[in-house]
């Protein structure tokens, strides 16, 4: 299959929506040609396969496609097209460019299709436009942020014209937002990074305010804390959002995404009306929980390192190994936390710390 | 805490000569041929292979004698001074000799100790305290192993080991007015000049990595190798791979937890995708990895017997590599620099290093080493200057 043929087939699958059958044979019929294409055209990916003695001719199951750890996206251009064909580059958050992973795209067709199919299904299932209040900068302000891009595209598809990004020129005024939220008469989609929500909640607490946001309002948080606020567990964060904003737990959704993937994972709480911490895996994606020592699947119900196989990643790498520990459950997976490597049982500094001035500061 | 009052009373036994004799006796128990203490720790430690614990302790404690303790005390502590009644010692990491010295040194000032063992190594501190009891129960009574965080509030001084975040959190908790010494996590490297046989340098370097599996702050995370004549760095990398393979028998690596396996997988993948690298891997296993870099780059710091060989043209290359590592650089192990060692020392100290040693001795810090560049005893005590 050519790349164009693969992409047409993936787009067709995405167009069927998140409720399309997660057909394994269909997945494999696209994953294996895509892997071979990425091996042939992706110099960095080929080097990785060669070092681990993977012969693409002998890879017969999608599970055996070598995964690229997210850290490798910091080291090399993981792409199967020339740099001049790049139309967009998303970078992981970080303090320096050399320590940031990058996803290079020569087409946004699959990225957009996957993004809108899942965002729509899990946050705007009624398909009615809603006002977005985004606790993040716009894509114009943060052109390499996949999150800002996602919000911009989602607003275009599902937002009302008065939707807005609350972070401007790198700053936001929580008091203005608190007042705005207190005065809301119509539902909104309040969304942003987890650390931005912590700042908002802290501000509301400082003002002694507890709100009751209009019926139909929904919240989506994502992206972790990255040392930019105090850290809360998902449970604690959702509990605080629920209490402080007057939101039912089932209308608070965590999105799990990463810069290196073309697709994102959502908790289907809003869609089903039942709060859950399970992340839904779209039909065109597969997720494994593996033992990193053997690369085999862990036993059902056991925790393993999450590896995602995303057919929307046509231009980079189909399989991406995360630094997250998770467990597979019916319909998706639960995230249990970040892996902590040798630093936890040693006294040397972790691999990346010295590349990050934020940690290297005295 | 009642325990702290008991410790303060036990402090009466901490006469300098008695403490020195007790510590020296305990060290001797640990390094003696067939030591039951060493054997127990080797068997039960869990992070390292029994061979690494056995060899690592004998090698590290070889020069930890009564003379060294006495000289250190004389060098650092001259009366009149006041030492803390009880010092809280918060340990981190998993390297047994580091736990031993963390107990021995503050005891040498005359302070009793409340010691919280590291979560990754609950045994080393406990066994060392028990060995001290075997030598001198009176001195050992001034050491209590526990985990009550209230000790941080109530002790007269605090010594903490750990990540920068841990140190900062404890420092904030201590506040001002009490001595606080923090030892954050560090990183070390090896530098190999032109004047050494590549095979012999690689063997020493491999041992420096293999002892404590590359986990320690004194473990070399990179090897900067003079690539003159061109191809020499590749020669060192090949010799290093052979040396690691040989050590599989005598100093096998310990078991990894899943997060560590994932970290190694990622380190290998990152090296694999970097342009110009060449990897040598343990056959079918993750037990060691040598990466020959394509040029003067700064790859991620290696750990768990993963080592990047970075070719450099000259000492300027070493300087460029080291400079940004401050303040986290700890030790530079070197070989083959001949008359250029003073310049190497100068650039190492500029880059924040507190130790320059011969290759093969990186895991053998002297007991009186100025850890992180500060005297091991002085920061704990309060001096009285008596003017004439």
Image (cartoon, grey):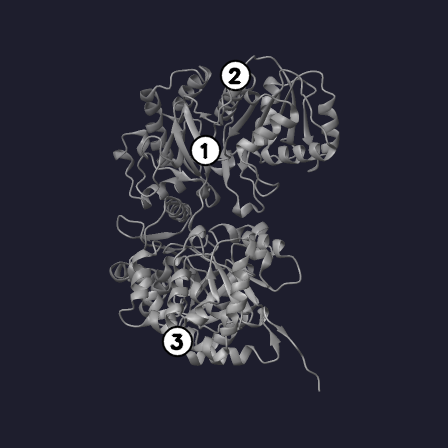
How many labels sit on residues? 3
Residue B383 placement (x, y as % from top left): 63, 75
* C-alpha gap between disc 1 and disc 3: 49 Å
| Label 2 chain ID | A
Q: Are marks 1 and 3 in contact (CB under 8 Å)?
A: no
Q: Quadrant of residue B93?
A: bottom left
Q: Residue at x 58, y 24 (%)?
A: A153
Query: Which residue is tagged 2?
Result: A273
Q: Are marks 1 and 2 in contact (CB under 8 Å)?
A: no
Res B317 seen here: no
Residue B19 placement (x, y as % from top left): 46, 75
Secondary element at tag 1: strand
**Who comes first in sequence, dot 1 or dot 2?**
2
Residues at marks 3 and 2, common chain?
A: no
Query: Which residue is tagged 3?
Result: B63
Residues at marks 1 and 2, common chain?
A: yes
Q: Is residue A162 above or below residue A68?
A: above
Question: Counting other residues with Cα less than 10 Å from the Cα at mark 1, is it few (<14), some (14-19), or many (20 or more)?
Answer: some
Q: Which mark is residue B203?
A: none
Q: Nearer the viewer, residue B335 or A12?
A: B335
In the visual, does B130 lie left or right of A145? left
| Label 1 chain ID | A
* C-alpha gap between disc 3 and disc 2: 69 Å
Query: Which residue is tagged 1?
Result: A335
* C-alpha gap between disc 1 and disc 2: 21 Å
Q: Quadrant of residue B79?
A: bottom right
């Amino acid at each position: 299959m050519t790349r164009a043929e693969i992409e047409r087939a993936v787009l067709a699958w995405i167009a069927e929506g998140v409720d399309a059958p997660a057909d394994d044979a269909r997945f494999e019929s696209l994953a294996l040609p895509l892997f071979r294409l990425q091996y042939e055209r992706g110099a960095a990916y080929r080097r990785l396969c060669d070092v681990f003695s993977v012969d693409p001719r002998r890879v017969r199951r999608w599970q055996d496609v070598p995964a690229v750890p997210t850290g490798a996206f910091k080291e090399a251009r993981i792409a199967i097209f020339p740099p001049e064909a790049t139309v967009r580059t998303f970078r992981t958050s970080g303090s320096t460019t050399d320590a940031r992973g990058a996803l290079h795209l020569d087409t946004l067709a699959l990225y957009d299709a996957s993004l809108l199919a899942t965002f729509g299904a899990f946050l705007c299932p009624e398909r009615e436009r809603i006002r977005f209040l985004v606790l993040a900068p716009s894509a114009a302000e943060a052109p390499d942020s996949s999150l800002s891009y996602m919000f911009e595209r989602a607003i275009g598809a599902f937002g009302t014209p008065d939707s807005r990004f609350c972070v401007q020129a790198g700053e936001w005024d929580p008091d203005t937002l608190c007042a705005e939220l207190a005065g809301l008469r119509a539902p909104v989609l309040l969304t942003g990074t987890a650390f931005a929500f912590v700042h908002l909640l802290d501000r509301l607490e400082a003002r002694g305010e507890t709100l009751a946001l209009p019926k139909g309002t929904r919240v989506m948080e994502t992206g972790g804390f990255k040392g930019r606020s105090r850290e809360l567990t998902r449970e604690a964060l959702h509990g605080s959002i629920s209490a402080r904003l007057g939101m039912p737990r089932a209308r608070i959704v965590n999105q799990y995404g990463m810069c290196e993937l073309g697709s994102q994972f959502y908790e289907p709480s809003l869609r089903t009306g039942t709060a859950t911490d399970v992340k839904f895996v779209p039909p065109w994606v597969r997720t494994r929980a593996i033992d990193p020592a053997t690369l085999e699947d862990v036993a059902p119900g056991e925790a393993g390192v999450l590896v995602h196989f995303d057919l929307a990643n046509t231009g980079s790498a189909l399989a991406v190994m995360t630094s997250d520990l998770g467990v597979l459950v019916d319909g998706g997976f639960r995230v249990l936390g970040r892996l902590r490597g040798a630093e936890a049982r040693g006294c040397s500094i972790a691999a990346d710390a010295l590349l990050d001035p934020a940690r290297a500061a005295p | 805490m009642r325990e702290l009052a008991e410790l303060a009373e036990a402090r009466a036994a901490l006469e300098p000569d008695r403490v020195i004799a007790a510590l020296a006796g305990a060290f001797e128990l640990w390094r003696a041929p067939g030591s039951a203490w060493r054997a127990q720790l080797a068997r039960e430690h869990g992070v390292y292979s029994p061979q690494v614990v056995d060899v690592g302790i004998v090698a590290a404690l070889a020069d930890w004698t009564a003379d060294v303790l006495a000289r250190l005390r004389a060098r650092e502590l001259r009366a009149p001074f006041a030492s803390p009644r009880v010092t809280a010692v918060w340990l981190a990491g998993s390297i047994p000799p580091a736990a031993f010295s963390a107990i021995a040194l503050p005891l040498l000032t005359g302070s009793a100790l409340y010691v919280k063992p590291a979560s990754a190594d609950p045994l080393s501190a406990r066994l060392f305290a028990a060995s001290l009891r075997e030598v001198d129960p009176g001195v050992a009574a001034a050491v209590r192993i526990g985990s009550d965080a209230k000790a941080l509030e109530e002790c007269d001084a605090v010594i903490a080991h750990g990540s920068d975040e841990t140190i900062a959190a404890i420092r904030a908790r201590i506040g001002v007015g009490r001595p606080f010494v923090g030892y954050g996590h560090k990183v070390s490297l090896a530098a190999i000049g032109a004047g050494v046989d590549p095979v012999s340098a690689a063997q020493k370097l491999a041992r420096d990595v293999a002892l404590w599996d590359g986990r320690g702050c004194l473990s070399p995370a990179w090897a900067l190798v003079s690539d003159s004549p061109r191809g020499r760095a590749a020669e060192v990398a090949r010799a290093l791979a052979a040396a690691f393979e040989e050590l599989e028998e005598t100093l096998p690596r310990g078991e990894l937890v899943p997060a560590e396996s994932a970290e190694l997988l990622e380190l290998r993948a990152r090296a694999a995708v970097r342009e110009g690298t060449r990897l040598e891997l343990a056959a079918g296993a993750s037990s060691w990895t040598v990466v020959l870099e394509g040029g003067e780059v700064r790859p991620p710091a290696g750990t768990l017997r993963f080592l990047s060989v970075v070719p450099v043209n000259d000492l300027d290359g070493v300087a460029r590599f080291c400079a940004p590592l401050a303040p986290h650089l700890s030790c530079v192990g070197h070989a083959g620099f001949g008359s250029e060692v003073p310049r190497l020392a100068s650039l190492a100290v500029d880059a924040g290093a507190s130790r320059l040693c011969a290759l093969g001795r990186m895991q053998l810090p002297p007991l009186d080493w100025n850890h992180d560049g500060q005297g091991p005893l002085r920061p704990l005590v309060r001096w009285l200057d008596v003017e004439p």
